[in-house]
Image: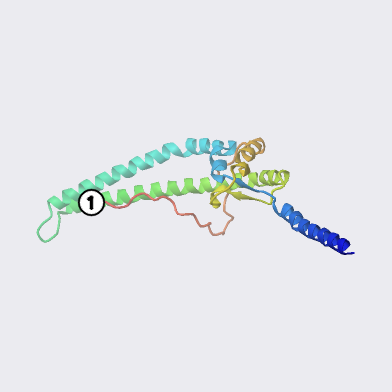
Amino acid sequence: MKMLLKSAGLALTIAAASVPSAVFAQAAAPTLTVDVQRLFADSAAAKSAQAQIKTKYEGNLNAAVTSYNTATTTLNTQVEAARKVQKPDGTVPPANQKAVGDAQNAYNAAGERLEGMQQEVNAVSRYVQSQILRGAGPVIEQVRNERRASMVLPKGSVLASDPAGDVTSVVIQRLDQSLKTVSITLPQQPAGAAPAAAAPAAAPPRGR
């Protein structure tokens, strides 16, 4: 009888030990990662957008930068010229005042043009990224399901991850088959709608 009890106790112990193992096996679904920045740089859609943006904006943006730099140089020159003829009471001849004022206006206008173009390019870039993410969503879910993963995280949001769980290349390969290009034409705002808030743009230096 004692032997039967001992055997039964051993069986219960083994059975109890097997339950956490089964639970652990279910909880051990892998977590995958995707390098979102690579999607924005290396996918066919991203490369198409880069080419479109370069064609549409590069020439005008370079011209705006040149105009801004020229206006900055002119303003500095006129300010220095006015300083040299400044009287002890702080006044300068009217001609110099006008030259400085005109140079300041040209500088402000050039800076506003450059900043406006930079903001537009930034808005287009965000629009392109939103299209890529929208197209990548179903692809990422497909890969997650195939690999029986619990979730897919942006690679940049985790401190460390198993390289084997990085499925970026697979996602890009499949995304390229379903999304080869995107639009760089910003959608029109509905009449009367308030414009969406823009992320801070890299503004040109405004100091002298």
The colour mode here is rainbow
Name, please, the residue furthest toward the front: 2
Residue that appears at 15% across and 52% down:
83
Question: Residue drawn 44% across and 51% down?
Answer: 201
Relative placement, left or right, of 160 versus 115 is right
Q: For this rendering, which residue is in front, 70 or 9?
A: 9
Residue 21 versus residue 152: which sits nearer the camera? 21
Residue 3 position by quadrant:
bottom right
Residue 173 drawn at (x, y percent): 63, 36
Q: Is residue 86 left or right of residue 62?
A: left
115 vs 135, nearest the viewer: 135
Number of other residues with Cα within 10 Å of mark 1, as a class: few under 14, some 14 to 19, many 20 or more? many
Residue lying at 36% horizontally and 49% vertically, measured from the top left: 204
x, y percent for residue 60: 42, 39
Residue 33 location (% of width, % of height): 61, 47
Q: Is residue 18 left or right of residue 86?
A: right
- Residue 186 seen in render: no
As drawn, the residue found furthest toward the left would be: 88
Q: How many marks?
A: 1
Regarding mark 1 in the picture, which secondary structure is present there?
helix
Residue 69 visible, this orientation: yes
Between residue 190 and residue 199, name the one nearer to us.
199
- Above or below residue 181? Residue 19 is below
Q: Residue 4 appears in which quarter of the rendering? A: bottom right
State which quarter of the image contains the N terminus: bottom right
Percent position of residue 73, x then y: 26, 44
Single out the residue that lies furthest toward the right.
Answer: 1
Q: Give the amino acid type for the residue marked by disc 1 in the picture.
A: Val
> Which residue position is annotated with label 1?
100
Q: Is 71 displayed left or right of 162 in the figure?
A: left
